[in-house]
């Protein structure tokens, strides 16, 4: 180092216990197999998660869920689409979805 220079030490953040499961986060489009009975009406992609709404108003989410943005009532991540059961249990139909960096916004009909 020369006089006046600042030394920068990079440290790698250690994953928390709940982050130990490997989740495939891809920075490019990838094919996804969905059951044939699901007709996708809308798709939204966040920075690390994705959501779809079926033509029947069901919401499916997958990806990184550390902040609960997948809507499954936990902070679990998932490589496979999972239906958001809360909407089914309360009789709500998803109409629109917008995924943000660590959030998911949905418009629903009762």
Image (cartoon, rainbow, N blue to C red):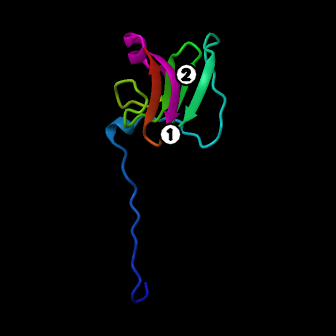
Quadrant of residue 32 within the rendered picture: top right
In the displayed structure, 97 sits above or below 94; it is below
Callout 1 crowding tier (Cα within 10 Å): few <14, some 14–19, many ≥20: some
Callout 2 crowding tier (Cα within 10 Å): few <14, some 14–19, many ≥20: many
In the image, which is nearer the foreground, mark 1 or mark 2? 2
Q: Position of residue 34 (x, y in %)?
A: 61, 18
Residue 79 visible to the viewer:
no
The Cα–Cα distance between marks 1 and 2, rounded to whole angstroms, is 18 Å
Residue 47 visible to the viewer:
yes
Quadrant of residue 87 within the rendered picture: top left
Q: Which mark is residue 48?
A: 1
Magenta run includes residue 27: no
In the displayed structure, 28 sits above or below 94; it is below
Secondary element at image label 2: strand
Segment colored magenta: 79-99
Nearest to the observer: residue 10 or residue 43: 43
Q: Name the residue located 34 percent from the left edge and 24 percent from the top edge.
A: 73
Q: Name the residue located 39 percent from the left edge and 87 percent from the top edge.
A: 4
Q: Position of residue 82 (x, y in %)?
A: 48, 21
For disc 2, the marked residue is 53
Tell me: 91 left or right of 96.
left
Q: Position of residue 59 (x, y in %)?
A: 50, 21
């Amino acid at each position: 180092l020369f006089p006046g220079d600042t030394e920068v030490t990079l440290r790698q953040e250690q994953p928390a216990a709940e982050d130990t499961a490997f989740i495939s986060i891809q920075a490019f489009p990838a094919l996804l197999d969905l059951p044939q009975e699901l007709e996708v009406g809308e798709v939204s992609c966040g920075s690390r998660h994705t959501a779809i709404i079926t033509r029947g108003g069901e919401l499916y989410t997958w990806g990184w869920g550390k902040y609960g943005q997948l809507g499954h009532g936990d902070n679990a991540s998932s490589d496979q689409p999972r239906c958001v059961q809360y909407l089914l249990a309360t009789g709500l139909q998803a109409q629109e979805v917008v995924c943000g960096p660590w959030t998911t916004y949905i418009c629903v009909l009762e």
